[in-house]
Image: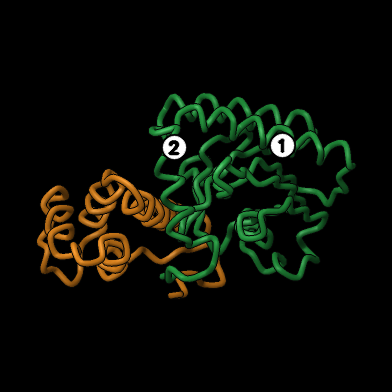
Amino acid sequence: MTALTTDPVTSVDRLAEIAALDLFSPAAQTVLDRFARRAAQHLGLPVGLITVVLDDAQVMAGAHGLAGWMAQTRGVPLEWSFCRTPVATGKRHVITNAAVDATQRDNPLVTLEGVRCYAGSPLVTSRGQVLGTCCVLGNDPREFTADELRSLDLMAAEVVAQLEATREDPRG
Amino acid sequence: MTSYVTPSLTVEAPRVADFRDAVRRASGADFEVTWRRVCSDAGVPPGAATMSLDQLAALADAVTNSAGVLGVMGRSLAVRLTTHRTLAALKGPRS
C-alpha cells in the first residue's frame, strides 16, 4: 500500500482537493464522458479519458472508447496508470510508442492490452493541485503535433473550470 | 508499497489490513471510532483479520461513502477490488 509521503500523488492536500469536487456523480460522469469523446475525436484516437488519479488507483471519471474489462471497471491500479506521471510532475506527458518506452514497456496495459500511444494534459486546479488528466490513447505508435497537444491542454483547462464550479466551498 | 501485480493481467484484492491502513492514515487519532463506524456501516466484524470478497466490497462501499480524504482512499481500494474481481472472472475464458 502506498504511504503518504512527499510524493505528490499521495499528498493529503491533493486527495482533499479531489474530495472537495464533484468528480464521481452520475451528473459529473455525463459531462466528463462528453469531454473524453471530444478529446478522442479531436485527436483522431480510439480512446479519450478524463482520469482522476487517487492514492492507489486511477478512475476513468469520463471515458470514450473503452472496451472490455476496463469499460466495466472504469479504473485501474495506480501502478498501471499512465496518468500518474503528469500528476506527479504537473506537466503534459506524451508517449509515442509505449512498447519501447522505458517507463511503460512492461506495463500490462501495453504488453497485454496493446496500448501504444498516450498524451495526457494535467487537470490543475486553481489551488495548484493536479486531479488527473485529460488524455487520449491508441493502439498504434503515433506522433502528436504541437497543435494537437495545445488543444489537449486547453481542453484540460476547460474540464477543470467545469469541475471547479462544483466546489463545495468556493472560498475555502 | 505492497506489490499487488503479477506478470499477467491480474490484481490482488486489497486485504483487511489495507483498509485498516487507509482508515488509520485518514483518521489519525480517531482511527478506532472511524474503523468501528465503517465496519458497522458495512455489516462486517471490526475485529476480523480476513474477510470474504463480498465483505471487502461492503467495506469498500462504506469507506468510499465517508467524507473527505477517507472517501477518496476508499474509492482507491474499491477500484482495486473491482479490478481484481473483474479480471478474475475473465481469467477462465482467457486461459
Nearer to us: label 2 or label 1: 2
Q: The residue under label 1 is which amino acid type?
A: Pro
Q: Residue B66 at what x, y percent from top left? A: 26, 46
Among numbered discs 2 and 1, the one appearing first in the sequence: 2
Please indicate whether residue A21 sits to the left or right of residue A128 in the image: left
Which residue is the extreme one toward the bottom?
B2
Color style of the picture: by chain
Q: Does residue A141 sit above or below B27 in this rendering?
A: above
Colour green belongs to chain: A
Colour orange belongs to chain: B
Give the letter of the chain under mark 1: A
Q: Which residue is mark 1?
A: A46
**Quadrant of the snapshot with the N terminus of chain A:** bottom left
Mark 1, secondary structure of its residue:
loop
The answer to whether residue A38 is seen in the rendering is yes
Q: What residue do we see at 74% from left, 53% from top?
A: A93
Q: Does residue A60 sit above or below A56 in this rendering?
A: above
Mark 2, secondary structure of its residue:
loop
Q: Does residue A120 sit above or below A3 in this rendering?
A: above
Q: Residue B80 at what x, y percent from top left? A: 41, 57
Please indicate whether residue A139 sits to the left or right of residue A21 in the image: right
Q: The residue under label 2 is which amino acid type?
A: Leu
Which residue is the extreme one toward the front?
A171
Query: Which numbered tag is attached to residue B22?
Result: none
Q: Are marks 2 and 1 on the same chain?
A: yes
Q: Which residue is mark 2?
A: A21
Q: CA distance from mark 2 to mark 1?
A: 28 Å
Is A4 or A149 nearer to us in this picture?
A4
